[in-house]
Image: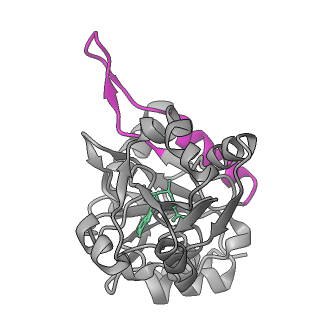
Amino acid sequence: MLDFVGLGLFDEKDISLKGLEKIHNADKVYVEFYTSILMGTDLEKMEELYQKKITVLSREDVEQHAEEWIADAKDMNVVFLTGGDTMVSTTHVDLRLRALDMGIETSLVHGASIASAICGLSGLQNYRFGKAATVPHPYVTSRGSRVVSETPYDTIKMNMDNGLHTAVFLDIDKDKGYMTVNEALEILLEVEGKRGEGVMTDRISVGIARAGSPSPVVKADYAQSLKSFDFGEPLHILIIPASLHFVEAEALVKLAGAPEAILEDVD
Ligand SMILES: C[S@@+](CC[C@H](N)C(=O)[O-])C[C@H]1O[C@@H](n2cnc3c(N)ncnc32)[C@H](O)[C@@H]1O
């Protein structure tokens, strides 16, 4: 049996009782921290609370060599842990399908996810979100030119045209670190400036830091101002709202300190 268990958002205590039960019954427990990471804990604290040894898998272990560790699940209980919900904004459905092809039974234990936390913390309605985007760190080519992905900007623009908000996930890179809301806004405004377009200028953006922690930060402001706001420690996520329903605008003013002027431009 291969059990996929979502760890929730912030520390080792965010796991569900069902998830914990799966770990207690497991012969082997694996975790990956490349799609998301619990910033309020570490492997030692997790192993202490869960009373199990946990092996950390790299992206390569999960995406290229999965058969090697999944095979044990043919005659053992193997648990695979992931930050947030195990199947939200990850590619882990591929792992599940591979396991099924190998004749291995699978199960899911869901965890609190950033996808729903952003709605709760900001007051933006979950049914008004379109396709999510990810802002990767810029990279430098062998010839020395800096390359910035324009894909997230295109996604925001497409969603905006359809009246939909965009959740913008921020890159987690083992060398370059955790991207901040500030860096992501700089990158998106750079693309906007280069193209001479105006999707984000004069619009409210929302930054959220450390969802699920005792002190999450939620701040809404015009992109140019928000890019210098201090959100503190990671993880961060950015939301680019489309037009706002009046309750969403009121929530952004009261829950995220947005300028009251936004109350005059609502649906
Ligand atoms: C690719 S998503 C994976 C989502 C995860 N499976 C879930 O369901 O929550 C990871 C990105 O979401 C955002 N994120 C995840 N947890 C967060 C948290 N607790 N606070 C703020 N942002 C978070 C970060 O931008 C991070 O890079």
- Tell which of 71 and 248 is nearer to you: 71
Residue 237 higher or lower than 112, as above or below: above
User: Quick check: can you spot residue 233?
Assistant: no
Q: Residue at x 32, y 56 (%)?
A: 180
Q: Residue at x 62, y 81 (%)?
A: 248
* Relative image position of residue 149 (x, y in whole percent): 46, 32
Q: Residue at x 43, y 35 (%)?
A: 60
User: Quick check: can you spot residue 36?
Assistant: yes
Outermost residue toward the bottom?
254
Q: Identify the coloring.
A: one colour
* Relative image position of residue 48 (x, y in whole percent): 27, 77
User: Where is the N terminus found, in terms of image quarters?
Assistant: bottom right
- The span picked out in magenta is 135-163
Residue 31 higher or lower than 256, as above or below: above
* Relative image position of residue 87 (x, y in whole percent): 62, 58
User: Where is the C terminus found, in terms of image quarters?
Assistant: bottom right
- Tell which of 30 and 16 is nearer to you: 30
Q: Residue at x 61, y 76 (%)?
A: 124
Residue 96 higher or lower than 144, as above or below: below
| 153 inside magenta stretch | yes
- Tell which of 57 and 176 is nearer to you: 57
- Tell which of 98 and 24 is nearer to you: 24
Q: Is residue 102 left or right of residue 7?
A: right
* Relative image position of residue 20 (x, y in whole percent): 49, 79
| 164 inside magenta stretch | no
How many circles with numbers are drawn on the protein?
Answer: 0
Q: Is residue 259 left or right of residue 100?
A: left
Outermost residue toward the front?
75
Residue 197 falls in image quadrant:
top right
Residue 76 falls in image quadrant:
bottom right
